[in-house]
Image (spheres, helix red, strand yellow):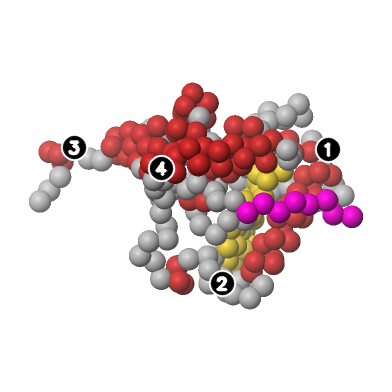
Amino acid sequence: HVNSKGINIRIPEPDHPIMEQDIEKMKTLLSKIESVFEEHDVVFLLTDSRESRWLPTLLCESKNKLAICSAIGAESFLVMRHSYIGPNVSISDDLNISSDYLGCYFCSDISCPSNSQINKTMDLKCSVTRPGISMMAAAHSVELLISLIQHPRGFCASAPFSYKDIDAETERSFGIVPHQIRYFQSSYTTMLSTIPKFKRCSACSIHILEEFEKRGYDFVIDVCNNSNTLAKVSKILELVISMEPPIDMLHF
C-alpha cells in the first residue's frame, strides 16, 4: 500500500530572477514548500540542475531532515547523504566523520550556484545521459536509505575517511553506509568518498543558516535575484579575495 500525494510546484533557484509583482506569490509558494518538508523525515534531491538543489538543501539543514542527493551526468552519477543531527551522533575521530559533520552537495565547491541553463548545449546538461544511469542512481539512493534505517545509529551513522578497512562495517546486515557514491559507466567503476562540511558552504554553512533564520523568505528571494548574495553571506567572496595575489606580485 502506497500513501502518496503529488504536488506540482516550482522550486525557487539562485540566479533565476523573481519579478516584483510575483514576490508575494513566491512567498506563499515558499511557505507551501516549507510545510511539505516539515511533514517528512527524508528528502530525495532529484532535480535536474545544480541550482535547483540549493533551497531543498538549505531547508533540510535548517529543519534537520535527512537529505539524499542523486545527480546524474552523461555517463556517471553521484549519490550522497547530507549531514544529520540526532541523539545517536558519534564523535568524529581519525577514522570516521560523524553524521553531523558530513558535507552537502555544495560543500566541495567554492563557486556558488547560479543559472546553469544559460548558454549550454544539451550534452552539458543532465537532460542527456546514457540509458540506465538514472535507474541505477535511483536504486543506489533507496539502498543508501535502507542501509541507514537498518544501522544501529540510524541516520546518525558516521562515515569512514577510508574505505580500505571496512570489515567491521560490512559485517552489519546491510553493509556500509558511505557518504558519497560515484559511478562512472565508461570504466564501470565505483568510487566511495567522504567529504567534511565546508564552513563557508553556500547552502549549509552557519552563515547561510543564520541569514535564513533572520530574514526568512526575503533572503531566498534576494538569492534568486542575485546569486552574488550567497558569495557575500557565506564568506566565499572573502575567501576568494584572500586567495588573489597582491597587485605588486602580478606580472604583465
Give the labeled residue for mark 1.
152
Amino acid at pointer 4: Gln
Give the labeled residue for mark 4.
21
SS assignment at label 3: loop
Image point (85%, 54%), residue name:
2
Give the labeled residue for mark 3.
246
Q: In terms of sequence position, does the residue under pointer 1 or pointer 2 come before the other?
A: 2
Looking at the picture, does residue 31 appear above or below residue 80? Answer: above
Give the labeled residue for mark 2.
129
Q: In terms of sequence position, does the residue under pointer 4 or pointer 2 come before the other?
A: 4
Amino acid at pointer 3: Pro
153 relative to 181 in the view: left or right: right
SS assignment at label 4: helix
Q: Based on the displayed image, in which of its 4 quarters is residue 132 positioned?
A: bottom right
Q: In terms of sequence position, does the residue under pointer 3 or pointer 4 come before the other?
A: 4
Q: In the displayed image of the protein, which residue is found farthest to the top?
A: 214
Quote the CA–CA distance across marks 3 and 4: 44 Å
Residue 128 visible? The answer is: yes
Q: In terms of sequence position, does the residue under pointer 1 or pointer 3 come before the other?
A: 1
Q: In terms of sequence position, does the residue under pointer 2 or pointer 3 come before the other?
A: 2
* Residue 151 vs residue 7, the one in the foreground: 7
